[in-house]
């Protein structure tokens, strides 16, 4: 007697995501916004450009960078001033470690929570249903 192939586990919807916020006490926390800011600084070499990509003022982006620089033992972002090609900003090794560790925790949490995410998704109204 042949066995039926196992049904593939339903995968959470592609647009479903899980985000973490890690509170270290006091005003010290790291979450998806700060991590994305670091990723965009890496991509653009600029706090200003990273802030624009997040629809955030330069001041707000700079304040978040300053907050992270003060929160961790080592700076997460360093700025180079002026020169022929102008200044620039780079994410330090510590900053890159923070991004890597955060994204790994996020990936693991999503994997561990997939059954619950699927169950929650089944409780949602269908996407084409309008709420009144």
Image (cartoon, grey):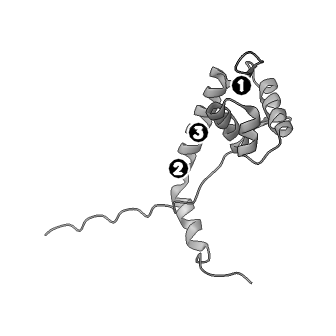
- The residue indicated by pointer 2 is 112
Q: Are the residues flagged by discs 2 and 1 in contact, CB closer than 8 Å? A: no
Q: Characterize the local packing of mark 3: few (<14), some (14-19) or many (20 or more) Cα atoms within 10 angstroms.
A: some
User: Is 55 left or right of 2, judged from the image as shown?
Assistant: right
Q: Quadrant of residue 59?
A: top right
Q: Is residue 39 above or below residue 17?
A: above
Q: Is residue 98 above or below residue 75?
A: below
In this rendered view, identify the residue nearer to me: 52 or 60: 52
Determine the secondary structure under disc 1. strand
Kindly report the distance in space between the C-alpha atoms of the residues bearing marks 3 and 1: 22 Å
Q: Position of residue 89 (x, y in %)?
A: 71, 25
Kindly report the distance in space between the C-alpha atoms of the residues bearing marks 3 and 2: 14 Å
Does any portion of residue 39 appear in the rendered image?
yes
Q: Which residue lies at the image location 57% right of the left edge and 46% below the top edge?
A: 109
- The residue indicated by pointer 3 is 103
Q: Characterize the local packing of mark 1: few (<14), some (14-19) or many (20 or more) Cα atoms within 10 angstroms.
A: some
């Amino acid at each position: 007697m042949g066995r039926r192939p196992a049904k593939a586990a339903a995968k959470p919807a592609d647009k479903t995501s899980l985000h973490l916020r890690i509170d270290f006490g006091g005003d010290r926390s790291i979450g998806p916004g700060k991590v994305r800011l670091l990723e965009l600084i890496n991509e653009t070499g600029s706090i200003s450009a990273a802030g624009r990509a997040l629809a955030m003022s330069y001041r707000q982006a700079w304040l978040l960078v300053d907050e992270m620089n003060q929160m961790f033992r080592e700076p997460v972002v360093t700025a180079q001033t002026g020169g022929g090609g102008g200044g620039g900003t780079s994410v330090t090794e510590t900053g890159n470690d923070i991004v890597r560790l955060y994204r790994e925790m996020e990936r693991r949490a999503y994997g561990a929570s997939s059954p619950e995410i699927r169950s929650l998704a089944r409780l949602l109204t269908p996407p084409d249903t309008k709420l009144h």
